Image: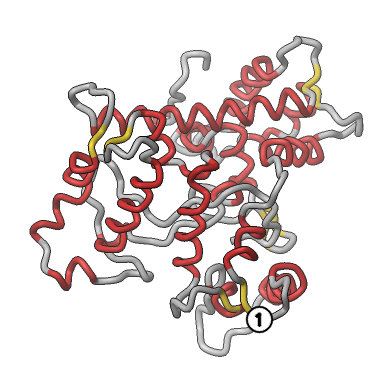
C-alpha cells in the first residue's frame, strides 16, 4: 500500500488463475491499489524511495516490461527509440504530456485486452456470446469438489479457497448487468478488471475493506492500516521511518472524523479519490524525471539518456528475451 494514495481504483483480492488450478501457495493478498504497485506488489514510492519497476510497467505494460528487464542497455535503448517514435504522434521531435498520457492509456488498454482475450478463449471454447457462471466455476474451482470442508476453509494470509469462490461469485453478480448469470465480453472484462469500471467500485471497495479489516468489525484501525503494508521481521524490530510517516498520514489525512478508524466512506476517499487522472499523473512524473531543459516536454535524446526510468535493463538472458511485437 502506498503512502501517496492519490491513484485510482482498487483491485481486489486474489482471482484464481484462469487456466490453472490455484495452489495454496498462490493464495496471497493482492495489493489494494494496483495502479500504485508493480506486478511484484512493490509500491511506487516507499517514503522517498522510488521503485522504477512501477514506471516500467506503466510505460510498457506488465508483460513487455518483463521482456525489457532481460535486455542489455544497448538493446533497451534501441527498442525504446522505436517506441518513442510511435509516441510522437505529430512527428515534431518532442513528446508532450498529452502524447505520453495517451501512450500510457494505450499500454494499459492493450494489457487488459490481451488478458481478457486469453481468459475469454480459455473459458469459452465454443466461442459463444457469453460465459455462464457454472462454466467459469467448473474451470477455476472444480478441483474443490474433491476437497474436504477443512481444506476448503483453510486460510493462508486470511484467504481460503472458499472465500475466493465467494468473492468471485459476488463480483460476477455485480458484473452481470442483465442478470442472466452469464457474462458477455464487456461484462467479463469488468469482472476481471474491476478497477476500470465505475459500476464495480462498491464490490472492490468491499473486498479492500475485507482484506485489511482483520477483526471483521467493518472498519479499519490504524494497526490494521499499517499491518497491511508492513510487518516486522523480528519481535521488537524498530519501525522504518516511512511507517512512522504512514501513521501520521492515517491520523492527519485518512481518519477524517478523528475516531481512530477508517469507515467505508473514508476508505473510499482514500482508494478512489475523486477527479484523479492516473495516466496524467504518471506522465507528469516521467517528464519530471527526464526533462533536463525544463521545457515540460521530452526529446528523444532526453528519454534515451534516462532509458532506465522508462524501461530498465538487467542485462541478463538476452538470448531468451524476445519481445512479443514485430516492430522490434
Residue extending farthest to the bottom is 236
* Residue 275, percent from left and from top: 72, 44
Which of the two residues, 199 or 29, is positioned nearer the viewer here?
199
Residue 183: quadrant of the picture: top left
* Residue 53, percent from left and from top: 59, 45
Give the residue pinned by disc 1. 260
For image coordinates 39% across by 37% down, the residue present is: 177
For image coordinates 58% across by 38% down, the residue present is: 313
Residue extending farthest to the left is 146
Element assignment for label 1: loop
Q: Total of numbered circles in the picture?
A: 1
Which of the two residues, 288 or 70, is positioned nearer the viewer here?
288
Mark 1 crowdedness (10 Å alpha carbons): few <14, some 14-19, many ≥20? some
Look at the picture and state if 134 lies above or below 253.
above
Look at the picture and state if 9 lies above or below 93.
below
* Residue 52, percent from left and from top: 64, 46
For image coordinates 52% across by 14% down, the residue present is: 327
Viewed as shown, does residue 126 lie left or right of 164? left
For image coordinates 75% across by 10% down, the residue present is: 90
* Residue 109, percent from left and from top: 52, 29
Can you say which quadrant of the picture contains the N terminus? bottom right
Residue 158: quadrant of the picture: bottom left
Specify the color scheme.
secondary structure
Look at the picture and state if 153 lies above or below 34.
below
Residue 164: quadrant of the picture: bottom left
Amino acid at each position: 500500500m502506498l503512502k501517496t494514495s492519490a491513484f485510482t481504483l482498487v483491485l481486489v483480492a486474489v482471482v484464481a488463475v484462469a487456466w490453472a488450478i490455484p495452489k495454496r501457495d498462490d493464495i496471497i493478498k493482492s495489493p489494494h491499489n494496483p495502479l500504485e504497485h508493480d506486478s511484484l506488489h512493490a509500491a511506487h514510492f516507499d517514503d522517498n524511495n522510488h521503485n522504477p519497476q512501477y514506471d516500467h510497467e506503466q510505460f510498457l505494460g506488465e508483460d513487455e516490461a518483463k521482456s525489457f528487464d532481460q535486455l542489455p542497455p544497448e538493446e533497451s535503448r534501441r527498442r525504446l527509440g522505436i517506441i518513442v517514435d510511435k509516441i510522437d504522434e505529430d512527428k515534431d521531435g518532442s513528446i508532450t504530456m498529452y502524447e505520453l498520457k495517451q501512450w500510457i492509456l494505450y499500454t494499459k488498454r492493450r494489457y487488459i485486452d490481451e488478458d481478457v482475450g486469453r481468459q475469454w478463449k480459455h473459458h469459452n471454447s465454443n466461442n459463444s456470446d457469453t460465459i455462464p457462471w457454472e462454466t467459469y466455476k467448473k474451470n477455476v474451482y472444480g478441483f474443490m469438489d474433491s476437497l474436504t470442508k477443512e481444506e476448503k476453509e483453510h486460510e493462508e494470509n486470511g484467504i481460503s479457497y472458499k472465500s475466493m469462490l465467494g468473492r468471485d461469485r459476488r463480483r460476477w453478480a455485480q458484473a452481470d448487468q442483465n442478470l442472466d448469470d452469464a457474462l458477455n465480453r464487456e461484462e467479463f472484462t469488468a469482472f476481471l478488471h474491476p478497477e476500470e469500471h465505475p459500476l464495480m467500485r462498491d464490490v472492490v471497495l468491499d473486498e479492500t475493506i475485507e482484506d485489511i479489516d482483520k477483526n471483521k468489525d467493518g472498519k479499519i484501525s490504524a494497526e490494521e492500516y499499517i499491518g497491511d503494508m508492513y510487518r516486522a521481521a523480528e519481535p521488537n524490530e524498530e519501525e522504518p521511518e516511512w511507517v512512522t510517516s504512514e501513521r501520521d498520514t492515517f491520523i492527519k489525512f485518512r481518519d477524517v472524523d478523528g475516531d481512530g478508524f477508517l469507515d467505508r466512506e473514508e476508505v473510499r476517499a482514500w482508494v478512489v479519490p475523486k477527479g484523479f487522472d492516473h495516466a496524467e499523473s504518471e506522465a507528469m512524473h516521467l517528464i519530471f524525471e527526464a526533462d533536463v531543459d525544463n521545457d515540460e516536454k521530452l526529446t528523444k535524446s532526453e528519454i534515451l539518456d534516462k532509458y532506465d526510468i522508462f524501461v530498465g535493463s538487467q542485462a541478463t538472458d538476452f538470448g531468451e528475451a524476445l519481445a512479443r511485437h514485430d516492430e522490434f
